[in-house]
Image (tube, rainbow, N blue to C red):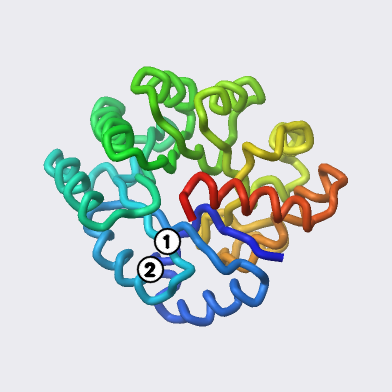
Amino acid sequence: MQLIDSHCHLDAAEFDIDRKAVIARARASGVGVQIVPAVTAASWPKLREVCAADAGLHPAYGLHPMFLPEHRAEHLQQLRDWVERESPCAIGECGLDFFVDDLDPEAQRLFFQGQLELARDVQLPLIVHARRALDEVIQRIRRVGGLSGVVHSFSGSPEQARQLWDLGFMIGLGGPITYTRANRLRGLVTQMPLEFLLLETDAPDQPDAGIRGQRNEPSRLRQIVDTVAELRQQPAADIAAQTTANAGRLFGL
């Protein structure tokens, strides 16, 4: 079984002590490829270095809304220059977060809009974070046009998911679907067309139910696959094959 973790922050400080071992465990579990999105401009050089050390790691560069206090207006032009030089697999992580207090919505919109336009201009997919902001995210994607990507850690409704699919976007699901209380998400994964699904860990965050409260890592993607297979009553190998193909197609791997 070959898997792609479509969203993993392997450059995070939580992995500094054992990154090679984490990668080895992932590979042993079938996760040979990981998409690693950035969060701040300051993180880009380390992310590039981490990904350069292993052919299975593919960087994406962007400005994450939760790190808004670290962003400066000039970072948008720096991102454009960096992307044109480095040729990443995607733009991100970017988006809107109206859940966290003290993150100015207008400033978030400025950075998100700039990254939407960059993705359109360079024809790269987007990795989008949307929390309590999904309707506006969809509206902005539609308004810019000509975009593709994934809304990672999707937590919206089936109707919002359908709107994203119509716009050429996939949805990313991970640890939250392993919790039995996640009724809406589990219902969505049961009914949705598999060609629009990406699987992710969001490691070191969002651990699955089996490691609640612990550091997450890419090897746990197998638990996500098994959960989707159980919910859909399909072979895990079929889930793995389709979602891996989806990620490969979106990110040009």
Residue occupied by mark 2: 51
Residue type for callout 1:
His
Pick the front one: 243 or 138: 243
Tell whether 113 sits left or right of 179. left
* Front in this rendered view, residue 207 or 21: 21
Marks 2/1: CA–CA distance: 6 Å
Pick out the residue farthest to the right.
Answer: 233
User: Residue at the location (78% across, 45% down)?
Assistant: 180
**Where residue 98 appears, x then y in whole percent?**
41, 30
Position of residue 110 relative to residue 50, above or below, is above
Q: Quadrant of the N terminus?
A: bottom right
Note whether 128 is above or below 166 in the view shown: below
Q: Earlier in the sequence, mark 2 or mark 1?
A: 2
Q: Is residue 102 visible?
A: no
Label 1 crowding class (10 Å Cα cut-off): few <14, some 14-19, many 20+? many
Q: Where on the picture, by quarter, is residue 12?
A: bottom left
For this view, does 191 lie left or right of residue 118?
right
- The residue depicted at 53 percent of the width and 53 percent of the height is 6
| Identity of the residue drawn at 62% across and 50% down | 245
Disc 2 is placed on an element classified as helix
x and y, in percent, of residue 178 in the image: 72, 50
Please tell me which residue is depicted at 43% across the width and 74% down the height of the picture.
Answer: 54
Marks 2 & 1, CB-CB < 8 Å contact: yes
Mark 1 = which residue? 58
Inspect the image, locate mark 2, and give the three-letter code of the amino acid beneath it.
Cys
Q: Residue 20, which numbered label?
A: none
